[in-house]
Structures are given as C-alpha cells and as structure tokens.
Amino acid sequence: GVSRAVHGAHTQGFNHNSVGIAAVGDFRSGQEVPRALLEGIAKVAAWKLRPGADPHGTVRLVSTNDKSRYKKGETATFHVITGHRDTHETDCPGEMLYAKLPALRDAVARLRKP
C-alpha cells in the first residue's frame, strides 16, 4: 500500500537499493522497440532514481543471495540504468531493448536536469 514500502523481486540478489521497470513485449533481434515504451521507461527512471544519481554512472551493490550471477556477499558494479541480463543468466530485456540502454540513460539525464 501507499503507507508501506514495496520490496520488489525484480533482480534476485540485488532487490535492495534498486528499482525494476518491466517492459512487456518481444524485443529480440529484429523486433521494434516502440518509442512510447522508451519514453515511458525514461520518465519512470528519471522519477525513481534517487536524488544525485547519475544515469550515466555506475553503482556497486552487494548480492544478498546466490540466485543471480553473483554469490551472496559478492560485490558487483553495474550501470545505474542496466538490463536484467547484467545480473542474471537471461536474454532479458532482449537484444533490441538492451541496445537502447545508452539512449535511455541520455533521456533520463535530460529529464533530470533542473
């Protein structure tokens, strides 16, 4: 509810201090990523990133379990805006959407400028 913090299960091992944004669709090679989807993801990311977070930066996180590419207690460095495949053995979010992450970082940075 509104009065209780939501704890997502979007990235096993790295659910603390992170936000998951789902993109429903098929974004494998050769598939189109709708512009409206990219704009929506950028808006949500710009809103949800903590104050001072650099959308082009990196973050070091410690895995809280063994359900990802990283063992419990292992430190990993990720882009502030990253794809599911960076933490798990998966193709998610698909080649075409993953290729858009640099442009999404740019869009989030523009949206966060005062």
Image (cartoon, grey):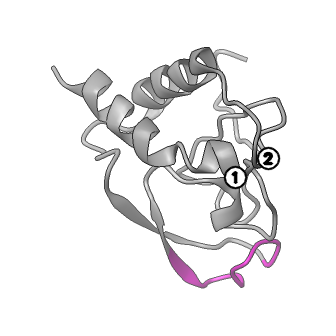
Lateral position of residue 46 relative to residue 111, left or right: right
Query: Which residue shows up at 80% across the image and 71% down it?
Result: 89
Query: Which residue shows up at 60% across the image and 54% down it?
Result: 16
Magenta stretch, residue numbers: 66-76
Query: Which residue shows up at 47% across the image and 20% down it?
Result: 43
Lateral position of residue 68 relative to residue 37, left or right: right
Q: What distance separates the C-alpha of mark 1 from that of mark 2? A: 5 Å
Q: In which quarter of the image is residue 91?
A: bottom right
Q: Is residue 65 above or below residue 51?
A: below
Labels 1 and 2: the sequence-earlier one = 2
Checking the image for residue 48, the label placed there is: none
Identify the element where label 2 is drawn: loop
Lateral position of residue 6 relative to residue 82, left or right: right
Return the x and y of residue 21 as percentages of the image width and height.
Answer: 65, 35
Of residues 27 and 40, the one drawn nearer to the viewer in this rendering: 27
- Amino acid at dot 2: Arg
Residue farthest toward the front in the current orientation of the protein: 30
Q: Name the residue under label 2.
A: 28
Query: Which residue shows up at 84% across the image and 36% down it?
Result: 26
Return the x and y of residue 13 as percentages of the image width and height.
Answer: 71, 66
Marks 1/2 in contact by CB < 8 Å: the verdict is: yes
Q: In which quarter of the image is the C terminus?
A: top left
Label 1 crowd bin: few (<14), some (14–19), many (20+), radius 10 Å:
some
Identify the element where label 1 is drawn: helix
Return the x and y of residue 24 as percentages of the image width and height.
Answer: 81, 29
Main secondary-structure element of the magenta-colored stretch? loop
Q: Mark 1 points at which residue?
A: 95
Return the x and y of residue 68 as percentages of the image width and height.
Answer: 76, 72
Of residues 61 and 95, the one drawn nearer to the viewer in this rendering: 95
